[in-house]
Amino acid sequence: MDVLEEITIILAEILDMEGLEITPETYLIRELGAESIDLLELSVAINSRFNIEVNDDELFLRTLRIHLRAAEMEGRDAAGYLAEKYPVLTVSRVGEILADMGGGPVLRMKDIISYITCYGKN
Amino acid sequence: MARRVVITSIGVVSSLGASSPEIIANIRQDRTAFAKAPFDEDIAVCPVSKFEVRNYTGPSKERRYLNRGAQFSVAAALGAVKNSGINHDSLKKAGLFVGAGPNLDIGGEFPDIRGGAMDRQDLMALWILRFLPNTAAAVRADLLGIHGENLTVGGACAASLQAMGEAFRKIKDGYLDVALTGGGDSRLHPGGILAYKKAQALSRRAGAPDGASRPFDEERAGFVPGEGGAFFLLEELEHARRRGGSIHGEICGFGSTFGGGGLTAPDPEGKHEEEAVRKAMAEASLEPSQIDVVSAHGTGTQLNDHMEAALIVRIFGSANTVPLPGGSDKPSVIALKSWIGHIAAACGAVELAVALACLEDNYLPPVRNLIKPCRPDIHFVREGTRCAPRTLLMENFGFGGQNCALVVKSGAVR
């Protein structure tokens, strides 16, 4: 079973949605309606299943806007700053996120997968 | 003019069934669910089989935070609303009054606990919600869109009757037009059984589990835990009439007192228990002779039933051994824990649902297993009786001296 399949099963249980269809492009908050309480359960489940010490802020890109503001204050390039703060995200993903900020919470399944792939010991 | 409060819908999940017709059919055929606890041969319990809360909630991510008692509570409330035909706007302003007990399922929630440490990977982030008494109320408010006054009552085994009394008062006194009230509970798991077994409150009578719950019998030996939930939609009479709600009965009086004596045993003289009953009848403007049926707390413990039987005789007087032809001015006494076990915080709500099902059917169920009554001068219902009783007195007395009584007139409002 790949990581996407495993997370889909975990999320289907947390959100109590049967036959959940999830791709790497699916937005967790925008599309699946995940709330902070659900992300909290997801974080605990990932910690348990993949044996990862989860940093919720990093996993769920929670401090994204704070980092952007910090970059602006320091006169730094936003993309470079974010790449530093989120080592699991690729340069192209950072660019995508910056272009997508106006549409609401940017967190997608592929970000969760990247995090697990990067830190997972399993 | 005084505001009157009517019951316009009932939702129930019980070991006798999840609707009035189902409950009546099972009672008529003496079909109960008493069984040995799967993990303790000595103990009888009365479980609800084939219950799945998702059948009531539909997909709901909050379901995971409901302990079994809370699941019964939520399911019964959703059932009551579904049966009522009430609209969303009325519900928005409705109140919510819930009787709840503690989650005692320690072993089920934390099977791996050792020396206070919980080395368990699958513990939910918010497992705390399965222990907070108001989680059921919060989930229900969310699912039903209820935003009015609310109260989660923790008055031990009188909790749900107390919640109903508070809901009744809020409507009667003009604070609300609509309120949803009741409770749910389950303590049949090892943690619950351990708690009551240690307290020596459970029946450990040898023989068929069916014979373990025997309220008011000389050979009673303790209570038998049950589980389930019931909820009632209460409405101010004119509000119910305007929207064409069907009326199952009227709540006419509520009495509540605090014993303030022992933490578990009732006051042997039953002084404050009696006061609760008298207050309920006074609010209903009824004399003892006008009560048709008493639904006793009747736990089947030595102490409660001794106290309660004496209380019934003090209030209603000594009944003839055999009812006189043409009736009697003494009430018939039923004890529904002999049918469904003791549902702890939810006993009052489920017992009222069962009692109303019986009264609507013009039928009084016998006190099961009552072979040698502890008193000869009370009209215990000894066999199923066809009659048309109308005025019902509910009694519940809980640990800690929680005493509640509710007077309900069943059927159409005159």
Image: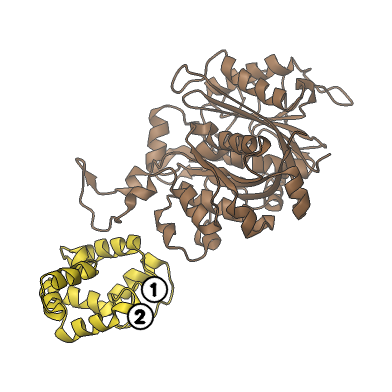
In the picture, residue B283 is in which quadrant? top right
Q: What residue lies at 51% left-to-right and 53% top-to-bottom?
A: B140
In the picture shown, does residue B10 fall above or below A114? above
Which residue of the protein is positioned furthest toward the right in this rendering?
A: B326
Q: What residue lies at 57% left-to-right and 17% top-to-bottom?
A: B272
Neighbourhood count class around disc 1 (C-alpha, 10 Å): few under 14, some 14–19, many 20 upward: some
Q: Amino acid at mark 2?
A: Ile
Q: What residue lies at 47% left-to-right and 16% top-to-bottom?
A: B261
Can you see residue B293? yes
Q: Give the image location of residue B244, x and y in percent.
A: 77, 54
Can you see residue B376? no
Check disc 1 and report its element: helix, strand or loop: loop
Mark 1 sits on what residue?
Answer: A32
Q: Name the image quarter holding the C terminus of chain B.
A: top right
Q: Are marks 2 and 1 in contact (CB under 8 Å)?
A: yes
The color chain B is rendered in: brown
Q: Which mark is residue B69?
A: none
Q: Give the image location of residue B306, x and y in percent.
A: 58, 18
Q: Amino acid at mark 1?
A: Leu
Q: Chain of mark 2?
A: A
Which of pointers 2 and 1 lies earlier in the amino acid sequence? 2
Q: Name the image quarter holding the N terminus of chain B.
A: top right
Q: Chain of mark 1?
A: A
Between B287 and B322, the one lying in front of the other is B287
Chain yellow in the figure, letter? A
Mark 2 sits on what residue?
Answer: A22
Q: Is residue B39 left or right of residue B81?
A: left
Question: Is there one chain holding both mark 2 and mark 1?
Answer: yes
Q: What residue lies at 15% left-to-right and 63% top-to-bottom?
A: A53
